Amino acid sequence: MPKIAVIGAGTMGHGIAELFAIAGYEVALVDIAEDFLKKALQNIEWSLRKLAEKGQVKEDPSVILSRIKPIVNDVCKAVEGAELMVEAAVENIDVKKKVFSEADRCAPPNAILATNTSSLPITEIAEAVRPERKPLVVGMHFFNPPVLMPLVEIIKGAYTSDETVKKIADYAAKLGKQTVVVNKDVPGFIVNRILARVNEAACWMVARGEATIQEVDSALMYKAGLPMGAFILMDYTGIDVVCFIGDAMLKRGFKSHPCPVITQKCQEKKFGVKSGEGFYKYPAPGKFQWP
Ligand code: 3HC
């Protein structure tokens, strides 16, 4: 059975690992601590049972789960014999470069090294690998929650080959996803770049007292037809992630006017669902419930 390595077992990483396991791949799932991996496997198990209840997976959840092998802090071991790595570690360029450099040393020569980064340039990340690997470095950007969201953005960095893009599109098709190829490695790619503008507009309306959080979210959901309003989606994504994406895009030339309603939440560490409170309150940290 082909092997995939997923680096980072957080919100995105565990969902990506789950998707590949559902599609029949052996998955090596890496994180820096055993506790994180334990939590990730619990989340995957919960999600698989949900999907099984609805007849959306063909195999027994325990069979799918048995294809995921947790590995503590060893990228080299995870990528050994893997045909693809998907990195979903923290949004820190130094951490990502370290993962890519290690993966480059240990993965088979033809293995593709993909990143699920939300906002960091693929070309910058590719600088961490040897020249012969650079055409195999690509963005494979999933959306939260990966098992339910239909889109994958495939981002071409300056060195990414067309063949690599094609292979990622094939993997995405095997996972049942639609793809959009992002040909220019611009800050925020397509989705996060547009979402940043929506969030900014929503946030400034609230900051200026023109509308409440609930009014903005209701308008976006019940008139604009979005599945979640801007504020509840920021809570769902993690307001810390939203702030990070905003900073990373600003540093790379995206013109924006950071809004205090968002930055204040970050300073207060009210990150949304993950901390139990953001723009709305939740029953417990990590437990989503519609407000
Ligand atoms: N696995 C399996 N089932 C899940 C699940 C998961 N990970 N997450 C939720 N579900 C289940 C729920 O338990 C619920 O099951 P039930 O019917 O048995 O009660 C069912 O899915 C429906 O969930 P909800 O009732 O909570 O609500 P919705 O019908 O609204 O669906 C949603 C949830 C699919 C998340 C929908 O609200 C949605 O599409 N929201 C927008 C999400 C989005 O835009 N994500 C992208 C964010 S941007 C991003 O990720 C980029 C990154 O770079 C930051």
Image (cartoon, grey):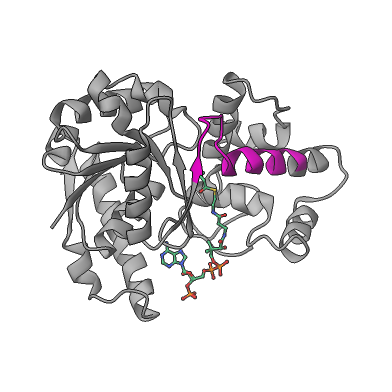
Vertical position of residue 94 compared to residue 172: above or below: above
Q: Nearer the viewer, residue 251 or 132?
A: 132
Position in image of residue 283 (x %, y %):
53, 61
Give the residue drawn at x 37%, y 59%. 173
Residue 196 as seen in the image, left or right of residue 218: left
Find out whether residue 106 is within the magenta segment. Answer: no
Vertical position of residue 209 compared to residue 103: above or below: below
Quadrant for residue 164, please give it: top left
Residue 230 as seen in the image, left or right of residue 24: right
Q: Nearer the viewer, residue 161 or 234?
A: 161
Evaluate whether residue 88 shows in this view. no
Quadrant for residue 53, please give it: bottom left
Q: Nearer the viewer, residue 17 or 113?
A: 113
Evaluate whether residue 15 shows in this view. yes
Quadrant for residue 214, please give it: bottom right
Position in image of residue 106 (x %, y %):
14, 30
Vertical position of residue 255 compared to residue 212: above or below: above
From which residue to which does the magenta span run? 181-201
Find out whether residue 198 is within the magenta segment. Answer: yes
